[in-house]
Amino acid sequence: MKKTARNAVLGMIALLVLFFTAVPPLVDRGMNKLTAAGGQPGVLRKDAAALHATLRVADLHADSLLWGRDLTVHGSRGHVDVPRMIEGGVTVQIFTAVTKTPRGLNYERNSADSDTIIWLALAQRWPPRTWNDLTERALFLAGRFDRTVATSGGRLAPIRTARDLQAYLADRKTGAMKTAGILGIEGAHALNGKLENLDRLYDASYRIISLTHFFDDEFAGSSAGVEKGGLTPLGRELVRRMNEKRVIIDLAHASPQTIADVLALAKRPVIYSHGGLKGTCNNRRNLSDDEARGIARSGGLIGIGFWETAVCGKDAHAVARALRYAVNLVGAEHVALGSDFDGATTVPFDSAHLVELTNALLDAGFREDEIRAVMGENALRFLAENLPQ
């Protein structure tokens, strides 16, 4: 081989090594950030840390499986890993699989004809079966969660059923330093348009599925889609099957018509896993008051997010204001946390520093029973009642 050709090959190899080793961490660090003061807690009230230590915190949405970090190790980037969850008092975290996002992602109008996740999949060396198959991507991420459980040294418990949750909560009462995860999916496009794939995803332990993400799919319209329509005939059948299997329906990212259609059709409580309310932050992504009331009437939960589009603010006090509005609107028993940790978001604190939110809730005048409810007890009750038995 000539020297120039050999140099070209070596250069290509060096570029590939850089792509596979350096790019994923750089993308992760650049997309999952903390605000300027994030991770550097300010002065806390004396009663905040004491109260927080007694809370059972539960969060309805984190995309941490996507980024390829070792979640058993205390990380220096992103928002969530097992050590930080334990440090922050997280009892249950819902880990959500993201299988496709469009190019030029925005909250107004996205088509389904592009796919940026493929580049992350290639950079992280996901298996070829995932390259063009969204169901296989979800199954791969479920396997990533299972491997995290297996290598966590017993610190991360998988929750698949209400019985699992009951046993885990009993174990925690013994003082065990552990946390738990439940699998969800962000967008029913992960079914590849095939209802039979619901069974495959259920068998892989997925228990929560949102009908849409940032674009309209075969089942429903998205709040950020092109048509922004409601449930399709296939979507109506999916809702029926999800009800039968006790898979929880998530209305985050759903269009107003999809929300109305689901609330008219669903036989079981639904959730809005992460976002905000137009009453405190008026944009297309957030719920109207009537939509929030409808979800509450179903017996469901509204998860308030931690990022600026959800709450129109960049600190814990903005999250507390949004939580107060939601509690006043639908009652404390229907409000929960929906952080969107590791969802390509900038948030004021990571999972290790959730005491910052407890502090902000105390500052906002929340009663202790309200704080316990929204920080986790509502979500734990909902899961105990609605997960498969």
Image: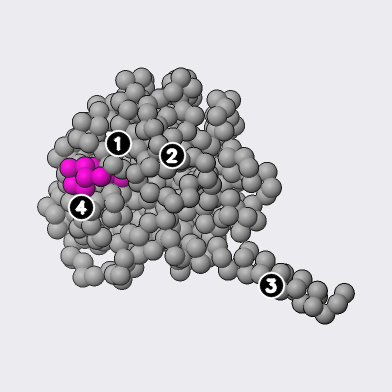
Question: What residue is rendered at 54% in x and 50% in y?
Answer: 117
- Name the disc covering residue 320, or none: 4
Label 3, label 2: how far apart the Cα atoms are: 36 Å
User: Percent position (x, y) of residue 56?
Assistant: 32, 49
User: Percent position (x, y) of residue 14?
Assistant: 69, 72
Up/down of 94 relative to 267, above or below = below
Q: How packed is label 3: few (under 14 Cα within 10 Å), some, or many (20 or more)?
A: few
Question: What residue is rendered at 64% in x and 46% in y?
Answer: 131
| Magenta-colored span | 274-283
Q: Which numbered disc flags the more N-terminal residue, 3 or 4?
A: 3
Q: Which numbered disc flags the more N-terminal residue, 3 or 2?
A: 3
Q: Which numbered disc flags the more N-terminal residue, 4 or 1?
A: 1
Label 4, label 1: how far apart the Cα atoms are: 17 Å
Label 2 is placed on what type of residue?
Phe
Location of mark 2 (residue): 215
Residue contact at pointers 4 and 1, CB within 8 angstroms: no
Compared across the picture, whether 363 is left or right of 176 comes to left
Seen from the viewer's position, the closer of residues 356 and 314 is 314
* Magenta highlight: main SS: loop
Label 3, label 1: how far apart the Cα atoms are: 49 Å
What secondary structure is marked by label 2? loop
- Name the disc covering residue 69, or none: none
Residue contact at pointers 2 and 4, CB within 8 angstroms: no
User: Percent position (x, y) of residue 49?
Assistant: 25, 62
User: Percent position (x, y) of residue 317?
Assistant: 20, 58
Q: Which numbered disc flags the more N-terminal residue, 2 or 4?
A: 2
Based on the picture, tell me whether residue 319 belongs to the magenta stretch.
no
